[in-house]
Image (spheres, helix red, strand yellow):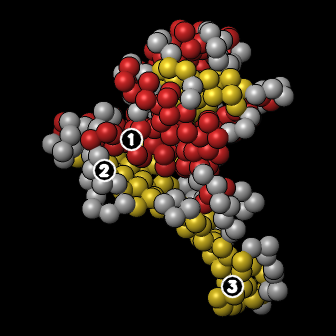
Amino acid sequence: MNSKLNIGVIGVGHLGSLHSKMYAEIDTTNFVGVFDVNEEKRKEIASKFKVKAFTSIEEMLLHVDAVSIATVTTTHFEVAKKVISAGKHVLIEKPITSTLQEADELITLAKEKNVLIQVGHIERFNPAIISLESFKLAPMFIESHRLAQFNPRGTDVAVVLDLMIHDIDIILSLVNSPVKQIDANGVAVVSDTPDIANARLQFENGCVANVTSSRISRNKMRKMRMFQNNAYIAIDFQQGSADVFRLGNEGEGSLWSTMLLGQIGEGKKKRNIIYEQPEIKKINALKYELESFVHAVQTNTRPVVSGEDGRHALDVAQQIMNKIQVQKFSV
């Protein structure tokens, strides 16, 4: 498909307005219009980007090939079902749906209608993650911290679905092994659902991930550390940077910015301790994500974060929340 993709945005709150801004800049799309139940908001965004303010989802679907859904999580299933039933491709902001049953129904319907689902796990497009594409990642221990200051806008879901699910998705994409066991705890501090949570994921291949998320932190933090055979990788999602410390053979070079930190002996074999900083591409993660969705639709290829990927992350997130509830009610 060489022609521009006709696309619209459903839900133009904070995130949907950002989707609108990006689509207006992507040269492979024809940004057609927006819909929101808030008439004033949809007219404001439509006027800003000189597109149509549709009065219903059904009206929009007559004019587009694909849509972004950036409504509240509880409406994802209902809205996406309408879109997919009309034979339109869809990018659904994370989490994919509220329940696994809803996710399964959307995935099945998308296959029947031969349309694509991409889920908005934006950290897959973070410059730090992109910079490591040429590095072989096989972590056996992962530790992540995702901390944010309190924002009432995210409290419609637990912190596990609001923040932690980003790291769950990244971890599942890196660890090619089924989850064997989950232990978790959490506390509801200022809302009716957990505002801080910690989970320990054990995988069948022996990898362990310790994941912490909080939305009542004084300072923001989005970091992940990974340890694997002969290497330690540190990722700062907030800064969009990555650092790699690894053992290399004597005289080994690198395409990246490299610094020799020292040398150790291993029997008769000497190994270099090498620090490498991958080249960071200056990209807008959201724009790159939306461009990836458009490309997948135009080339009929599997999205980077498919509906099945979104369903997998939701499954693990819900198992974590169930563990937290067990802890809560057993006290």
Front residue (pair 60, 293): 60
**Numbered disc 1: secondary structure:** helix
Please say if 34 is above or below 315.
above
Q: Classify the position of the C terminus by image quarter.
A: top left
Residue 215's disc is: 2
Please say if 135 is above or below 313.
below
Q: Earlier in the sequence, mark 1 or mark 2?
A: 1
**In-image side of 181 versus 270 (left or right):** left
State which quadrant residue 177 falls in.
top right
- Label 2 crowding class (10 Å Cα cut-off): few <14, some 14-19, many 20+? many
Residue 74's disc is: none
Type of the residue with mark 1 = Asp
Estimate the spatial distance between the alpha carbons at disc 1 and disc 2, rounded to whole Å.
9 Å
Q: Is residue 256 visible?
A: yes
Residue 259's disc is: 3
Residue assigned mark 1: 162
Name the residue located 52 percent from the left edge and 23 percent from the top edge.
34
Name the residue located 76 percent from the left edge and 28 percent from the top edge.
4
Q: Classify the position of the N terminus by image quarter.
A: top right
**In-image side of 303 versus 215 (left or right):** right
Front residue (pair 16, 81): 16
Q: How many marks?
A: 3
